[in-house]
Amino acid sequence: MASSVFLSVSLLILLHPLFTQANLHKSKSLFKASLLSQPPTNDSIPPTRYFEVTKPIIVPETKPFSINVLQHDFGYTYGKPPVSVNYNFPSDCPYQEFSKIVLEWNATCKGRQFDRIFGVWLSGVELLRSCSAEPRATGIVWSVQKDITRYSSLLLLNKTQTFSVYLGNLIDDTYTGIYHVNVTIYFYPAVEKVNPFKGKVEDLGSGADLIIPFSRNLPLNDGLWYEIQNATDVKEQEFEIPQNVYRAVLEVYVSFHENDEFWYGNPPNDYIAANNLTGTPGNGPFREVVVSLDGEVVGAVWPFTVVFTGGINPLLWRPISAIGSFDLPTYDIEITPFLGNLLDGKTHKLGFSVTNALNVWYIDANLHLWLDSKSTKTEGKLLQHDIVPLGVSSVSDFKGLNGTFIINTTRFISSTGWIKSSYGIVTTKSVQNLSFSNSMVMAKDGNLQIVDQRIQFDDIVYPKMPAFHAVSKNSLKRFLFSLYSDYIDQGNGTSLSVANVTLGFLEKKSKDPYSWSPRISLKNLQEGQGVMVVKDNLVVSGVASTQQTYNYHGGKFCYSRNVSSSNYTILHDEVRNECKKRAKFHSGFGLSRWWPSSSRRAFLATHIKLAAALLVQLPAICKMIGSACSSLGVKSSSLTVHLGFHSSEINGLPGAFVSSPKKSKLKRFSIACSSSTTDPLLVKAARGDPVSRPPAWMMRQAGRYMAVYRKLAEKHPSFRERSETTDLIVEISLQPWEAFRPDGVIIFSDILTPLPAFGVPFDIEDVRGPVIQSPIRSEDGLKALHPIDMEKLHFVGESLKILRQEVGGHAAVLGFVGAPWTIATYIVEGGTTRTYTTIKSMCHTAPSLLRALLSHLTKALSEYIIYQVESGAHCIQIFDSWGGQLPPEMWEKWSKPYITEIVNVVRSKCPKTPLVLYINGNGGLLERMKGTGVDVIGLDWTVDMADGRKRLGNDISVQGNVDPAYLFSPLPAVTEEIQRVVKCAGSRGHILNLGHGVLVGTPEEAVAHFFEVTKSLKYDSLFQNHAMEESKLLV
């Protein structure tokens, strides 16, 4: 890494963005294409400056060396060759080493024009993909600044290269805007001499030694990108790499247009066919860019939902452009594990395709290669490559043009390989873990559409190598897209459109693959509300507002911006550069956590002014389109409902809007226990439904074995605080989810948590653990008990709702309770005990008292379970932790009846919510446990899984039961034990778990391996191989 990047702040300056679609053919979907009606030109009005909100680029305080590469007026360029010029890095440049290289695109335009996609290439290597801004009659200007330091080896070559720009533009009587473009590259000399080895090995941003383009060759009458036309279209390119490569990363550029510009809103094909909607884009809303090497899938891209500057409602993006529209994101795929296959001196093929694609997707890529300067040949080997096929579940429920559609998809790819170079033998492991969910509602005969989409894109690379060579990354991305779109066609080419849009981009980066205290974090949230009247494809009237909060935290450098606008006018703009204490944040998109209330209040006043302005304009708008307003109910001001204002936020202020009927940011859950195809894998397995592999989670999967938990516990040493504060509960519960992606996320809590809610206060002491100062051992003690008060457990309900929101449909959210007997042991004994003498003797000396206590606990715990289910728990585990301390006959009398009663009560309210029963030391109780009526029996590690399955039968599901101590063993041994347990449990009704909780000191690498192995399992192949092995033994 160039050393100047990490110099003190005094040596750095910030290259701020200036004030600070690109397709030719628009989609025929519900998102209507339109141009703005243009007033007469007034040369006295200065052009409007458009911008995308992003952090400034850090550059050293050195005077940059610049090259004005291209200056061109893009008039009628559609269907013509890219504009190309010769590029030469000057041989007489006084500097040879640069710490930062920045490309700056400056453009102006005046008149009327659609948004246009454009690309910038150097020798076929794409440097920038962007979207033009839609102009206005008085003119616009915009600038894009991109850090292109990673292409330094190409930019500094001492030879003539071709620099190309393609911007397909049309000029005629309607489209009058000409784009006047100037492209300059700035080279910032290093303040200190760059360490070449450090720059190449530690940071990709310093640039690879060689970059191979995967794009089309000139001459062309289009961009250099490949065009993917449909789901079966595969573009391949042959290539050969040098013999001394020791690292390889593929950078992929992606954009989507025409029938797939709004892919996230495409309905499924059965809906289109049933309603005979010819010309409507379909194939549903899921898209995946698949990258293959010699025909084998090596990586995938699930793209961010970029909205181009003319998309949905053009007024939303003036002057604040949509996230990613001026600098489309790229996606890196680690190819290093596959170098052993590529270093053979032969030609290989790299391919690209798009799952479910319609025309058209523009895709190309750059292969970044690091060369061993001390060797002419490296060697390597691919050790492991696991691809879990797409896991897809969907619901399509419609009648006529109205319906609901849900799709959940997951993808897991893991690759490991070693490479031997002069730097030693390096084993690199790369993991891609992706999940997708999209819910879509169509109403008002297809004219109203609500879309809620979330993508989780996790990318982990960690090599095993000498520490000073280490190149690792842990990148976790979350993409959010929500849309409310209402369209009223009034005939005669006139329509009214109302749209609410939310875009979210969250990313956390860490160099440590097991650390989830991010080194770099970004939260970028954008919301827009707008209404427009369109006549003959021209926007003749309308109003829109956009609000955005951008927060970047990079350790020594931080940047935040809170900005809002309406119809070309900035209403509020606040920028901060100082680093404050990093706020807690989770992996999902709850708006309240993304968008602090203080920030919202900052532009609330301007929001109210906008609302007032809209109310003033509504009569005129309604007059123009006649009955459209009555269709929307404007007379009762219901049009304002669709613009996203909430009375709770502006209570008491004049002009307040009524609360939006659109779904709340945190989902509310009723007691919904119905089964569906969208249930998480764990829930299906718990019910005994067919699944392709066993789901997996771990008891105590959030806890002291994780470094990130220990760090948090240092700041919050009280266990009660950690387990009774909503933010902390959610953060801790999500730590293993973010690191390992288990199939179950259990709430961080304790079986004693509900005690104060029904009259039993307790403390937790460092040495003694839980302590109950007033144990219940008499009739007077029972008088302190009262019905459970759920208000005192609000943090449990709040946390479960957030967790359900965070993980979507990609994992089951688990709640839990202690069994009545186990809870009673604490209440009677006054805390933990090794002998249980007091409560066991009470079974004989005061049986009526004990039964009364157990009955009260049974009622309270039943209600507590139902409360957890109402709050979002998919599944509940009952821990009878100390039930194993009872002889089987006593357990049958003093524990089983009360668990059975809980099961019956919960089953009457939630008949489809799976219940799991776990007892530590349950070998002598299995058949009795089955008699409680639970859905799943958890086996501890002292029970042989094959024996347990035989004793319980196949009509009940089982959970477990790898010995927790196995996680201290070599990883191959862990793999073998997982496979053994899974084979013994059978292919139906099994949830993989440990036989007890994760032990303190367990290596995080072993936990990661546990889940990776599980996700790579396939029942079909596993039991086929098992059968073959058995047949060989018989022979």
Image (cartoon, rainbow, N blue to C red):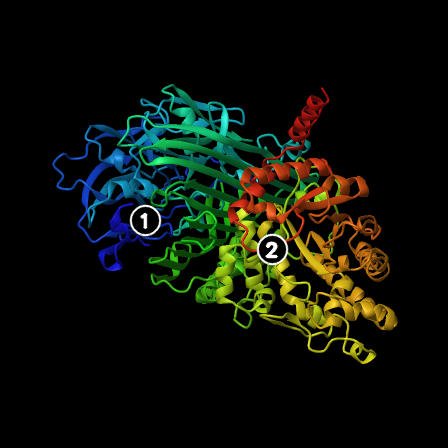
Label 2 element class:
helix
Q: Which residue is mark 2?
A: 803
Residue 32 lies left or right of residue 900; in this view the side is left
Residue 195 lies left or right of residue 854; in this view the side is left
* Residue 962, percent from left and from top: 65, 45
Reply above or below: 451 against 211: below
Question: Mark 1 and 2 residues: CB-CB less than 8 Å, in contact?
Answer: no
Front residue of this view, candidates 787 and 316: 787
* Residue 1019, percent from left and from top: 67, 32
Residue 615 lies left or right of residue 123; in this view the side is right
Label 1 element class:
loop
Q: Which residue is mark 1?
A: 138
Amino acid tagged 2: Leu
Q: Residue at x 59, y 61 (%)?
A: 637
Q: Quadrant of residue 1017?
A: top right
Amino acid tagged 1: Thr
* Residue 39, percent from left and from top: 37, 48
Front residue of this view, candidates 724 and 180: 724
Kindly identify which numbered label has been placed on residue 69: none
- Nearer to us: label 1 or label 2: 2
* Quadrant, the C terminus: top right
